[in-house]
Amino acid sequence: MDTMPSRKLTREGAMKVLEAAVSAAEAKGRSASIAVVDDGGHLLAFSRTDKAELYSIPICLAKARSAALTRFPSGKKSPTGNERDDHHALAITLAAGPGSFVSVPGGIPLFSHGECIGAVGVSGAGHSDVKIAEIAASTVEAITPKKLGST
């Protein structure tokens, strides 16, 4: 067979993830920029809370792209669970190209029925970035299969 069905995160689904992240940031009293990308790292939804720093915009997108492309949370831990040393983390970042990979936490892949459908990246909320992204990612389980398109 030359093709196979796949799941895709819809705009509606991306907005639910985004809204959950914004709500989580506000509940924690944190400012943040949030990006939701598809499984190829392409932007589907974005928001920046009122007091979020401008530099957090490209960082949240890079975190989301890192998680989508590796199918693993962004950060210095590798998919095997080992901590990458600084040299290795920097080498991967440089090799992947600008905005494609970062070795800082805050990007969480989104899975539906075991398949990566995208990722969410949060930046600007400090140590709360990861928790906000995890809360947002947990909403994917609430998106029914009807909300996910098939190709």
Image (cartoon, helix red, strand yellow):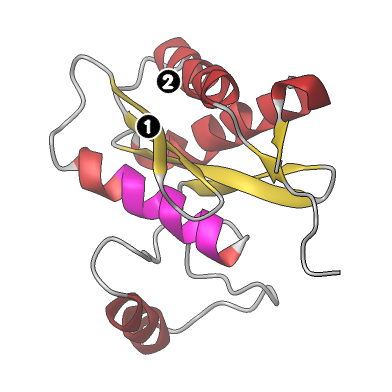
Question: At which x and y percent is residue 119?
Answer: 54, 44
Range covered by the magenta-colored residues: 60-69
Q: Label 2 near label 1: C-beta < 8 Å?
A: yes
Q: Quadrant of residue 20?
A: top right
Q: Comparing marks 1 and 2, which lies closer to the viewer?
A: 1
Horizontal side, residue 141 vs residue 95: left or right: right
Q: Main secondary structure of the magenta part?
A: helix
Is residue 65 rendered magenta in the image? yes
Residue bearing the label numbered 1? 34
Residue positioned most to the front: 2
Question: At which x and y percent is residue 72?
Answer: 61, 61
Local SS, label 2: helix
How busy is the neighbourhood of tag 2: few (under 14 within 10 Å), some, or many (20 plus)? Answer: many
Work out whether residue 56 can be spotted: yes
For the point 70% across and 29% down, the residue is: 140
Q: How many marks?
A: 2
